[in-house]
Image (cartoon, rainbow, N blue to C red):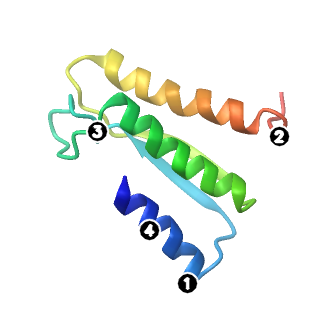
Amino acid sequence: LDLLATSLEKIDQFFRPDFLFYQSGTDVLATDKLGKLSLTHEGVLERDKMVLNYANTNDIPMVACMGGGYSPQIKHIVDAHVGLFREAAQLYDSRIIR
């Protein structure tokens, strides 16, 4: 998460993106059998909030896609992805076309 925060800061230092494509993989979960980052569900949500807030604060259009995820319990994968979309709905509620 520290590396992500640093990387988001560096993006602004070197260029101004016109668009953000966010591959929100869940292979970062501690329960994932292939990933090695060992994030908790709270850590994954914090990662998602960081990216969403970066895009929102800088008024950068963004698409978020599910990806990765090899936890033996599919509930872990689904919960992580649902967290992203719940957070996005709260943050962008007034901007979402229904």
Q: Is residue 98 left or right of residue 72?
A: right
Which of the marked residues, 2 or 3, is nearer the chain's N terminus?
3
Which of the marked residues, 1 or 2, is nearer the chain's N terminus?
1
**Residue at position x 60%, y 32% from top?**
87
The foreground one among 37 and 34 is 37
Crowding around mark 3 (Cα neighbors within 10 Å: few <14, some 14 to 19, many 20+) is: many
- Location of mark 4 (residue): 7
Which of the marked residues, 4 or 1, is nearer the chain's N terminus?
4
- Location of mark 2 (residue): 95
The foreground one among 31 and 46 is 46
**Residue at position x 65%, y 56% from top?**
55
- Location of mark 1 (residue): 14
* SS of the residue under disc 3: loop
- Location of mark 3 (residue): 39
Alpha-carbon distance for marks 1 and 2? 28 Å
Name the amino acid, label 1. Phe
